[in-house]
Image (spheres, rainbow, N blue to C red):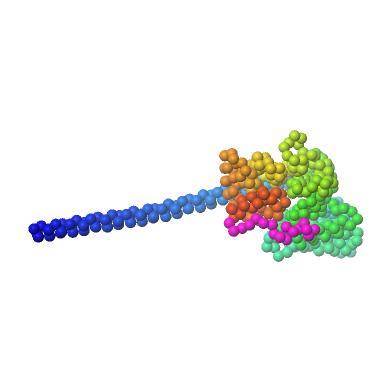
Amino acid sequence: MAEAEEDLVALITREQQGFRRILFAGFAALIVLVAMSAALGVYYYNVANSLGETSINLQRQAFDARLTADRQTNQVANLERAVRRTYDEFRVATIKSKAAASRPGDVINVVGVYLERGGHSLNDELLIENTAADMHSEASSGQHALIRGAAALLAWDRAGEQIAADAPGLPSLLADAKASFEKAQKDSALVRPASTGLAWVDYIYASSSRSNYALGDCDSVFKDIAAASVGAPPGPQPLYWRAQCERKLGRSREALQDYALALRQSGEISEATRDEAELTLAMNAFHGVGTQLIATFDTPEAELKDTMDLATSLCGPGEAGAKGSPRMLLARSCLDHAINLRRRLHQTDNQLSGSRENVSFSFLRDGDFDGAFANAAAVERTGLFPWNELLRALSAKHLTSPAARKAETEALQNVRFYAVGRFNPCELEALLNANLLAEARAIVESQHKGESLTCPKGKAQGEAAH
């Protein structure tokens, strides 16, 4: 009996040991399976991340490629326009010897027109530059300095250069122009053209990425134009420079008035007009008037009556029967004139959208999200613009259609690809109402973690400083 019990205990012990081995083997297999699952999870996670990063990189490359293609198309269009202008003017150009033989006093009027209106024929350009080169030291120093300054501006414009963001100061051509105009300004008979020339140099600097319309640099422009305006109002081009600075500093009412005055002073633009400077100035002024009508949406009508009457006489009241408030219809009419002038300048569809994208703001001011989205979608088909992508996302957010949902996703991604500074927060504050501005900020900041879409205090307080 004792032997049987011992055999039974031994059997049970062996069975328990075997069961434990099976348990240990099972646990080991389970651990191996868990480890393999974890490894596979990490692997697939890394693969998914890699695919996601690859997808984002490909999307970014497509975004950059599209911008590059648009830029190259625009450059070709600009070259074609320059060739067309050269061809037109060669047909009527006078010979060089005649230009060189002109007296300095005969060139002053040509210089004055160039400085105040920007327009110049190839013959005028040749006349100014040859006179500047051929004048002797005994010639009138004030006149010589004025002509030499204009010649430097022409050379700068022809070179097509820009002031870099890290530039130590004015490039040599602009520095020479500024010194020449300052010398000419000492001649009481030349104060107006010389001050206008100084305003042009200072505006080129203020509008560059080196300044980005800093308050002090715009104040220099304002001071120069004031000096040129003693006894007579400034010409259309100085009015445009002043309006640009006012707009960038948040002085919407003043900018609207100066854009309208620049447009009125630029004169009638006939269908036969082909002068590029004249068309460009009028186009910029129409664009400015339309945009500032949007920015002054909340300003009482009585405070803008004279300017509104002038804008209506220049742009027309807007399309009859169209949907929208009278002021926004007027804004669209002005922007339509700017777009038509861009066409006459043979600009590309992408360049036309430089004015067309602002139309979306007019729809948003009226609470018309369908209109804003339709316009933003049409602009996107011609190219990518920071404001338009932001407004495409903003307007699509208020709609429910599948097209709107898809567009919102695409636009948010493009917003992420643009630097925050490209959205011009100071101008957005003027163009959007408070609620939509808050939404726009939330959109940009959601795509740029840790950054904010806010206007610097110095510029936000610009209107009070005026």
Residue 398 part of the magenta-drawn span: no
Q: Nearer the viewer, residue 285 or 270?
A: 285
Task: Name the image quarter holding the C terminus.
Answer: bottom right
Camera-side residue of 54 and 413: 413
What's drawn in magenta, residue-wise?
449-466
Residue at far front of view: 1
Q: Is residue 181 above or below residue 61?
A: below
Q: Position of residue 352 (x, y in %)?
A: 70, 44
Quarter holding residue 274: top right
Q: Height in image: 67 above or below 21?
A: above
Asked if one can make out residue 420 in the rendered structure from this viewpoint, the answer is yes
Magenta stretch containing residue 463, yes or no?
A: yes
As rendered, which of 115 and 160 lies closer to the eye? 115
x%, y% of residue 141? Answer: 88, 63
Image coords of residue 292 (percent x, y): 76, 48
Above/below status of 321 relative to 328: above
The structure residue drawn at horizontal position 76% and vertical position 62%, both measured from the top left corner, is 216
Which percent across, then down, holds residue 296?
76, 48
Residue 80 in sight in this render: no
Quadrant position of the N terminus in the picture: bottom left
Residue at the outermost top position? 321
Residue 144 placement, left or right of 445: right
- The residue that appears at 72% across and 37% down in the rendered structure is 323
